[in-house]
Image (spheres, rainbow, N blue to C red):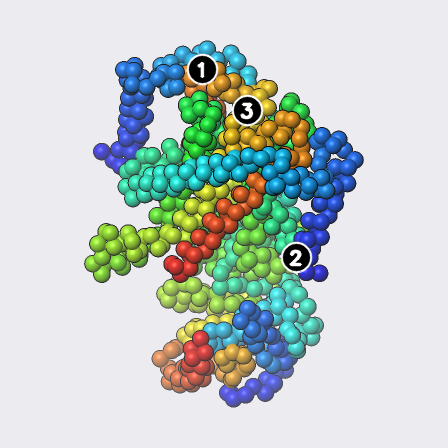
Amino acid sequence: MSATLRVRTLQAVSVIALLGLWEAVVRAGYVDPLFVPAPSAVVRGFGAIAPTALPALGDTLLKTAIAYVLAAALGVTGGIVIGSVRALHDTLHPFVGAVYGLPKILVLPWIVLLLGFGTAPAIAYGTIHGLFPILVLVMGAVRDVDRTLLTVARSYGARPWQVYVKVILPAIVPSVLASLRLGVVFCLLGVLIVEMFAGVRGMGSVMGGLANGFRAPELFAATGLVSVASIAIVLGLDHLNEKLSHWRG
Amino acid sequence: MSGPPARPVSAVELIRIEGVSKRYETASGAVDAIRDVSLAVRPGEFCTIIGPSGCGKSTLLSMVGGLVSPDTGRVLIETRPVTGPDPKRVATVFQDPGLFPWRTAVENVEFGLEVQGVGGKRRRAVATELLGPLGLRRFAEKYPRELSGGMRQRVAIGRALAVDAQILLMDEPFGALDEQTRVLMGEWLLDIWRRTRRTVIFVTHSLHEALALSSRVVVMTARPGRIKSVIELPQGYPRLMESAELVTLRAKLWSEIRDESLRAMGES
Amino acid sequence: MNIVAIRAVILVAILALWEIAARVGNPLIYVPPSAALPALGELLRLRSYPDLPEHLALTAQEIVVAYGLAVAGGLGVGFALGLHRVLGRAYGPILAALYAVPSVVWYPSLMLFFGLDAASKIAFGFLLGFFPVTLAVLAGIRQVNTHLVTVARSFGASSTTVFTKVMVPGMLFTLMGGLRTGLALAVIGVIVGEILGSKSGMGSLINHAYGLFRTADYVALVIVTLVLIVASDAVASLVERRARRWTA
């Protein structure tokens, strides 16, 4: 058996065994199905919540998309500007680092106070959440551009705008894509947190409600749905990433 | 021919280096990279600078290329002082080929022309024509990571040749290559040089390279870098390393460099 | 001008802007620094929230337990996957895929399972802290110079010796970074958990102040929480620097 086949088999067997074991343990009555529903109950739970969960997921993803576009635009341009202007970088990087490292959740109550319970706080908080990882990574990427390439460009008489367009921008493409991949998860995280906290619309509030109502099968189904959506988005970005950085090894 | 270099007697001078010095501030104090170096380079010459590590060879080259400005003294090219990079007259090849990894071989060769605003079709034509003598015709569409070390350095040299500058500065261009590739690249460069008649300033550590390629060898001292001696080599190519003349020259060059290398080793 | 001076000027400018904006705006929403400081004083003198020490201690305990579990779990899983090739290739991608899921989706299930008390916060803090530690172990193992391992083997070193004398020192730099990130995320997990639903801990106080529009108290509580977070990171960075000096 080839190594790859063995790995794939192990993966498949593990997942099936885990599901089977889980189902058996619940059916045998070792755990309380109120807390840990059997996989078959989760599937049935999905059927029950699909009519409300799918529109809620759409709502969440729309807010995430808006927050993501804002975070990406601000983060990438901000990262390029701060990363390439030395004085700006030296002055601002402790501030950026501090805001990046501190839990944004602490300002969430205030954002809800300021913007109410609708779509706006979710978008605002999602944007803040996604913005900083993108900003920090792009800033770092600009500073890490190979010095030799900049010297080469200079020795061939490239003007400052040519250095940007022909050296810095292409050089940071892989890091920008990596930051955008990370950023989308952070935006979705931010939107879900606001929905859970303020609980009006979207998957976050659906899941919060299911947890409070002790509806475990439906909650597990909803959790699975959001997880699958998120993994699909990230895999999609990975695919795009590979296409755009074909020159890398 | 050797001894302290008086101003070289020469009818025509293309490059004139006049009493340049450079000092760098580092974390562990100021370092005198080069001190009071003067040198004149004739058009069409293959001038090699050799010396121990850290003797300021690269700094000197960067001054001619306009990438570093001297603290004292000046560099003149065709009697005009150098104030910054002038890709119309000077092209540089570095030890790290410095290829843009997102550009194919031919696109890398085009870079200098592109920056100068030469149109797409014309620069592609120039680059494609160069790929032949570079031995890279079949590799035009490959990315740098798909090329061997020697091929990468040839692309970098092609990029320098494409801008059609009269002066070619080469900073240990073959330093990162293995010995065999190095010798072959040297032969290839000699061929290119003789056909295009560029003026080359070539920095190296290798005695063999200096003797095989140069029309003149400049030996620099350990830090702070100064010119120790200038050795004229016979005109003909290829150089027969076993000939009495070259064996003598080799011994002489080695004795000049040995002391300086020992001093550099002791310092570090 | 000195860079530190510029930074100070920026900081003062932000505070001044904040003060002006807050005085113009709705006092229920905007709290000027001049009002936040007295509120902080009241809080620290235990006037506004007399049981602050208990809540602070609870949050700190939750963080310590969550982080301890995350380190133990992360090291265990990391080494198991990193040293065993087939296991690593089978479960590594699954782990990476789970890491791509926004962590907060697990929180409602944890709340349902562990209730509203400390256990669900510890579980969430553990979950967040676990991933960076595991990934750092995996990255660290990949970074170990295989040539050094070969050299050690050629001198007849046993697997245990190779592990303790070559692998651990070789990966310590990366591992320490992961342990520090793990702490930061465990802290975030606990605090997010508390704010999303709890009866005690700093998060519950923050929610209380926010729910009653006691905005100045809210700001004061946030400042105290920030001090806790910054202090935990300072300890982590100290340990990190020590460990790096030992290996150097």
Q: Is residue B201 above or below residue A186?
A: below
Along the viewing direction, whichever of C126 and C42 lies nearer the viewer = C42
Q: Which residue is mark 3?
A: A196
Circle 2 residue = C4
**Residue at 64 percent of width and 50 percent of height:** A92
Residue positioned most to the right: C24
Amino acid beneath label 2? Val
> Residue, x 60% and y 81% (percent of image)?
B36
Classify C79 as above or below A115: below
Mark toward the start of the polypeptide (1 vs 3): 3
Relative to A18, is B177 above or below? below
**Which is more toward the observer, B116 or C2?**
C2
Q: Position of residue A239 (x, y in %)?
A: 47, 34
Please give the chain letter of the residue carrying mark 3: A
On the image, the x and y values in percent for residue C68 come to 39, 41
**Image position, residue C207 (x, y; %):** 59, 29
Q: Quadrant of residue C114?
A: top left
The answer to whether tags 2 and 3 share a subunit is no
Q: Marks 2 and 1, how far apart in space? A: 55 Å
Q: Across the whole image, how many numbered discs are drawn on residues?
A: 3
In three-dimensional space, the C-alpha distance between marks 2 and 3, rounded to whole angstroms, equals 40 Å
- How busy is the neighbourhood of tag 1: few (under 14 within 10 Å), some, or many (20 plus)? some
Q: CA distance from mark 1 to mark 3?
A: 16 Å
Residue linked to disc 1: A215
Give me the chain letter of mark 2: C
Assess whether mark 3 and mark 2 are in contact (beta carbons under 8 angstroms).
no
Q: Dot 3, crowdedness within 10 Å: few (<14), some or many (≥20)?
A: many
